[in-house]
Amino acid sequence: MAPVRARFAPSPTGALHVGSARTALLNWLFVHSPVAEGRGRLLLRIDDTDEERSDPVLEAAILEDLRWLGLDWDDGPVRQSDRTARYEAVLAELPVSRRDDAYEFGGRVIARSDGTALYNLASAVDDIDDAISHVLRGRDHTANTELQMQIIHAMGAEPPVYVHAPLLVFEGGAKVSKRDGEAGGPATIASMRRAGYPPAAICNALALSLADFGVDELMLTLDEMADRFDLDRLHTADSQFDEDKLRWVSGQHIRAMSDQELAAALAERSAPSDSEALLLAARTGGSTLEECATTTRHLIEPPRPDADAVALICDVNTANAFAVLNRLVPSWPVPLADSTSTFNEFKSLLRAQDFKLGPSLRGVRALLTGRTQGVEFPLILATLTNDRITAAQRSLSS
Ligand code: GLU
C-alpha cells in the first residue's frame, strides 16, 4: 500500500470552530493509526482561493489553535494562493466550457472569468500534486467529491480514497458551521480555551463524537485514540455537540493532570496553586480549569460573599459555630494530613453543643469562602490563612 498521506485544509475565513477542529482530528488520528504503519503524514493546506475573505490573521490563529490542541502536522502549511499558475495550467488542459464569463466543467463553475481557480479545481489539483492518499472530511463535502474525481480523471490521474464523516450538529440538527466560528462565537476553539477546557479533553470529546474506539474507557489521550482508531468504526449518524459530556470528560482530564500541569494552568489564570491542599481543591473543584481557578481564588482571596452567603453570614448561629471552630484550631491552615480528623472533631463539637450540623457547616463555609457550596470542608480547613480568619472575624463584627 502507498504511504498514507492525509491533509487538513481549513479556509482562513473564520476562527477554527469545533466542527472544523473535529475534521483536523479525524485526519490526525488516521495518519497516526495502525493502518499508517508509522509512516503516515499529515499536510496542512490553507484553502485561500477566496482572496477577499481570506485573512492572514485568521490563518495564524487557526495554526495556533491546532498546535494548542496538539494536532501537529508533518508538512506545510502550503497555501493555494501560491499555486495559481499551476491551477491555470491545469485549467488550460481541461475540457471546459465558458458560461456567464466563468469556466465550467461537468456543469459546475470551477474557475472565475479571469481564470483563477475556485475551491473544487484547486482542491482536486492539490490532492493529486501532494500525493494525498485519503481525503477525510465532513459529509457536507459529499456533493463536491464527484466533481473533484472527474477533474482528477480528466488530469489523467487516480483519485484518492474519499471518506465522509458524519457531522457535528447542535441540538435541533443545525450543522456546526463557519458562522458559529465567528470571533467570540460559542463553538470556537478559542472560546473553549478561554472557558478553560484542557486541549486533551476537547480532542477526547470530539473524538468520541466521531468514532467508537472499542473500549469502555471514555477518557483517552490522543495517542490512545490513535492506537485504536479505525475508519470502519466511524459513527454512521451525525452527533450532537454535547456540552455536558465535554464538561464530564474535561473534569476527568483535570483530575488526571500532574500537579505540575495543574499548577501551570492555575498560574496562567493568576490563581493560587502553591500548596498541595490548593491543588487538591482545584482538582476536585471544577469541570473546567477556569472553574478550578475560581475555586482556589475563593479559598485564598478576601471573600466577596454572594447573596446566599450573606444571608447565612448574618445568622448568629454561624458566628457561634465559627467560634467553636476557631477555638478548636490552634493555627491556620490545618495541615492537609490532619484536615479530615479536624473536620470530624469540629462536627462532634457542634453536635455535642446542639448545633444543627447542616446549617452550621453551610454558614461557616459561607463565612470563610463567600460561597454556600464548594470543595469538601476539610480542604477549606487546609487552605485557610490567618488573614482569611481575621477577615472572617471582621465581617462578623461589622
Ligand atoms: N477548505 C475546505 C473547508 O474548509 C476544505 C474542504 C476539503 O477538505 O476538501 O471546508
Image (cartoon, grey):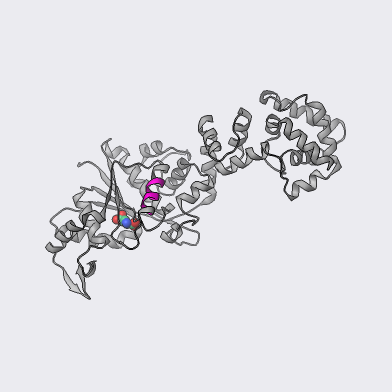
In the rendered image, is residue 235 in sight? Answer: no
Magenta segment:
58-64
Going by the picture, which residue comes out furthest to the right? 353
Q: Position of residue 112 (x, y in %)?
A: 23, 68
Q: Is residue 268 left or right of residue 316?
A: left
Q: Is residue 226 left or right of residue 150?
A: right
Q: Residue at x 22, y 53 (%)?
A: 126
Q: For residue 62: magenta?
A: yes
Q: For residue 115: magenta?
A: no
Q: Is residue 223 left or right of residue 81?
A: right
Q: Position of residue 89 (x, y in %)?
A: 14, 59
In the rendered image, is residue 369 in sight? Answer: yes
Q: Main secondary structure of the magenta part?
A: helix
Ligand 1 shown in quarter:
bottom left
Q: Quadrant of the C terminus?
A: top right
Q: Position of residue 335 (x, y in %)?
A: 68, 24
Q: Quadrant of the N terminus?
A: top left
